[in-house]
Amino acid sequence: MLPTDGFDTVDVAPAIMSSNENNTQGARRDERNSRFLSRENIVKMTKTTIVLSALLLSIWAVVLNHSIEALDSTSEEDSSILVETEGREADVYCPEGGADIFLGTDFDGDGKLSAEEITSSTKVCHGQQGLSGPQGQSGFDGTNGHNGNSSLVNLTALSPGVPCQFGGIQIESGVDTNRNLYLDQEEIETTAHVCDGQLGDEGPEGQQGDDGSQGYSALIEQHQAPTSICPKGIVMEFGVDDGTDRATAGDGILHDDEVRESLRICSEQLYEGLVFDSNTGVTNGFSNECSNADADEIMLFTSNDGLNGCELWILQQNNVPSMLMDIHSNGDSVPGRELGIHSVVTERGPRFFFDADDGINGRELWVSDGTSIGTTMLGDMETGDAIDWTSKITTWMDGAVFTTHGSQGHRMWWTNGSVTTSIWQAPWFSSVVSSDLVNQSTSLSSFGQGLLQGDEHGLWFAAKDAQAGLEMVFLSTTGSLHIYDLQPFGDSSPSQGLSMDDGFVVAASDGTGRQLAKLDHDGGYQWLTSLTREGTTTPISVIAPAFGIQQLGDVLVFDAVHRGADATLFGYSIASGMLQELSMSILAPGHSNEVVSDGVTIWFDCVLSNTGMELCQTDGTVQGTKLTIDLLPGISSSQPRTMAYVDSVLYVLAQGLDDSGTNSGHALWAIEGNTPSLVLDVWTGIGNNSDAGTYGGLTVTSNHLLFIADNGQHGHELHQYLRPSIRDQWMVWD
């Protein structure tokens, strides 16, 4: 039996006889002849039917074949067979993901396989990822490549003609192979032209409009570029003579308030570097004692020119230096030796307060408005020196409050540069209030000993009361006087302090150790901390020694010594009262420099066991208290000396590795986020250290950052770095 797909099976058993049997049975053939003839006829008819059917099927196949060929020829012209694949996410069919493959005919000819055109599909699954092979051995470091050459571009204006009919610009580019910072003729690799188009025809004239109101003249003025920024260039100012703000309208003069736009063009690179050589030659113009400075619209500083001693100098807005006054004609007046130079905005404009010795009256307080005539001594407060190392100064009530110390003891004064008077008789107090204050203050002495700070609510200072001892005192702007007896059995000896909206936080003694206390404006107080030495119940004795007390939102950040001999940082939450150590590994925060803050982050110098003395930061949390950057990788210290936060960038004078891997020595670095860049090194080269920041700090003016450094030729002198916000205002056509 032969099975056939799609059909029933049929048993076939044909009769096969030998010749002998055929002869033997011949006699019976005749009598059954009629029966055999009828079966043969049936068989013949069946065979005939099958043959005819086969012929008919053959004819039909031929016809159908021609039809299919015609259809195929039509489909090849009008339709295409398309195959599309789709990514397949991991599922029960493809645990590792894979792809679906669709096959069909593009009957509508849109180049896409729609759902109704798909005739078949299949899945292709990714195989399971194999195990990782063993890691190969690291290869050897290759040798360092050579520094590449810079690409340069020259731009040349073209007059009308060839190749630009209406003029244009020729652009030449190439590689500076000889490294002379100039694209020589033989270095030019490509030349292109950007041609100006032809001016269009003038359009039709519009209708006459209504007459407008009388306007003001537009003015244009051209000035020489400030040489402190651009050695050779111009500044063009555009404005309207309309009397904006304090200007006079219609006077034909373009006042500063009337300027609308300006164009600054420099034909040389903007200048950075040495401002001037005050003490000609390699001799230093600055020293530890003679390097004070402060800036407002102008900068006042101290310097020694080698002829007049340490005296008062001025740097105008154009960075033109000159000696403002030789206060001590026969020696050194050393301005700012005890109090520094302190700028204050008064009702009559900015004033600079500083101590100086004229050689006649001793060391007294002086004031300057930036002119020699306006630079005067405020008065001979004491026989001999009125200002010594115990004296303090702070800004308060549009002036300055300062203390003196002499034969009459410690006294406290207020001045605006024109009027100088006892603090108890300040001009805004009535005669009755002044009389009361004079009476209340008779029991006080040692004013400002350790702390003096003014704010919008009043004046906070330390003073010794005849009964309470050395305590905190608050004088409100209305004349109320409060004495805080923080240590009933002795002196609380206040030191570091921080003004807050609702009071004042101070580091002081509670009789057992030193902690932080919060003072209100009405004489009340509360102790905030109760820190003890690690592993003991002994209160700490050193709090806020260098970092001081800073505020970041709800958190007070301060330093304290509670283990070993080094201070660490702590954070105190004003809202919750929770106190926590912010870092155990960051030591001596703010030990060498004043801290810098943008209100969100505080930066400070620090010491870590694996990096040395570096730059750290904190946001008042444990996670945010960390090393900012290791400018000199490894145990070597970058020794940050002074910092300033300007134009959203932190600047620091420190040493670090430049792009070539060479120690820059102390130079000016800019840090954005955690990315440092060396922005000004006045004495470059291996082994050359400008010692920037050895004297003085970073002084910020409207245009520059100024610092003292040695460029190897002039000794320690004043240098300048142009602020990026000013640099962006200039077009440099070099």
Image (cartoon, rainbow, N blue to C red):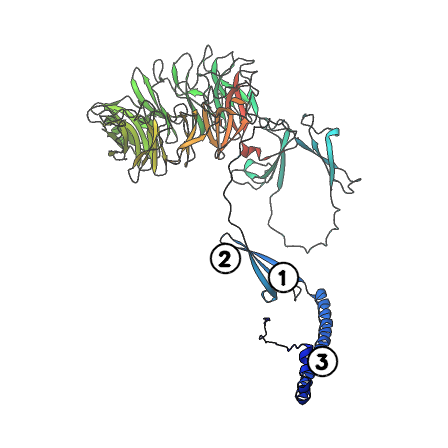
State the SS at label 1: loop
What number is the disc on residue 93? Answer: 2
Q: Is residue 205 above or below residue 599?
A: below
Q: Amino acid at mark 3?
A: Leu
Q: Is residue 549 above or below residue 194?
A: above
Question: How far from the left and from the top, in percent, is residue 450?
Answer: 31, 23
Q: Is residue 62 left or right of residue 610?
A: right
Which quadrant would the C terminus be assigned to in this image? Answer: top right
| Lower sequence index among marks 3 and 1 | 3
Instruction: Give the residue type that dot 1 points to.
Output: Lys
Q: Earlier in the sequence, mark 2 or mark 1?
A: 2
Who is closer to the viewer here, 487 or 479?
487
Q: Which residue is mark 3?
A: 52
- Disc 2 marks which amino acid? Tyr
Q: Which one is in front in this view, the residue at disc 3 or the one at disc 1? A: 3
Name the secondary structure under disc 2.
loop
Per the image, the residue denoted by label 1 is 112
Does residue 171 sit above or below 354 in this rendering? below
Separation (CA) of disc 2 from disc 1: 26 Å
Q: Which badge, 3 or 2, is on the more N-terminal residue? A: 3
